[in-house]
Amino acid sequence: MRSKQGFTFIELLVALGVLAVISGFSMMLVGPALKARQVEMAVRTVSLQMSRARQFSVDSRRLTRVTFISPRTITVEQRTPASEGGIWTWVTQADLPAEMEFGVSAGVSSGPEGFGTSSAVDFSSASQVFFSPDGSAVASSGQISNGVVYVSWPQEVDTTRAVTLFGATGRIKGWRYMHGEGLWK
């Protein structure tokens, strides 16, 4: 009669095999989930930096500049009053999550709300936008500026996202490109 003090070698191999199969399936599911999380974090980063810049401008009653530096950096600066020299001072900087970049993947032919897709960042043909003390977004010329920032995982259409800015109101909105439908939602 055999005592029940442990597992046989066969039982141990079967258990390890089952664990290997389960971990293999979970890795297949976790990879796309992590990529989707990075994509959403990129949209949040762009939206948050623009919202913060707008709020800095309103709170301090100073002009605030947001600059998008390829491939993935956003800087926010504020202008000191003319009596203090009117120089730009650094406020904050943020980077998009790893692998994410400013850009539109090939296959995306039109942007949300009629914005074009000819450049990754477009605020009156520039890669920066200014927020006035009243909260509106303006170009370097001082005129109201609408704009769009595209982010994506390079060469993957399904990861393309956009953040639009409507200059007169300072409204910021995130968009997701639905590749199968060819629509922005």
Image (cartoon, rainbow, N blue to C red):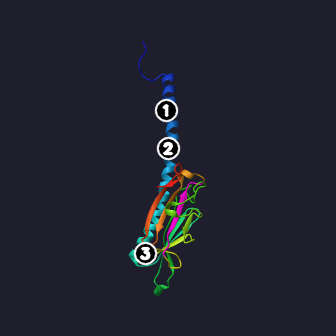
- In front: 162, or 113? 113
Q: In which quarter of the image is the N terminus?
A: top left
Q: Mark 2 points at which residue?
A: 30
Residue 144 in percent (x, y) is at 48, 75
Residue 57 badge: 3
Residue 79 in percent (x, y) is at 48, 79
Q: Name the residue under label 1.
A: 19
- Is 8 covered by the magenta stretch? no
Residue at x-position 46% and y-position 87%: 83
Question: Which residue type carries mark 1?
Answer: Leu
- Is 147 covered by the magenta stretch? yes
Residue 118 in percent (x, y) is at 60, 63
Residue 119 badge: none
Question: Which residue type carries mark 3?
Answer: Ser
Q: Closer to the N terminus: mark 2 or mark 3?
A: 2
Disc 3 is placed on an element classified as: helix
Badge 3: how crowded within 10 Å, few (<14), some, or many (20+)? many
Badge 1: how crowded within 10 Å, few (<14), some, or many (20+)? few
Spot the residue most to the left: 59
Which residues make up the magenta segment? 144-154
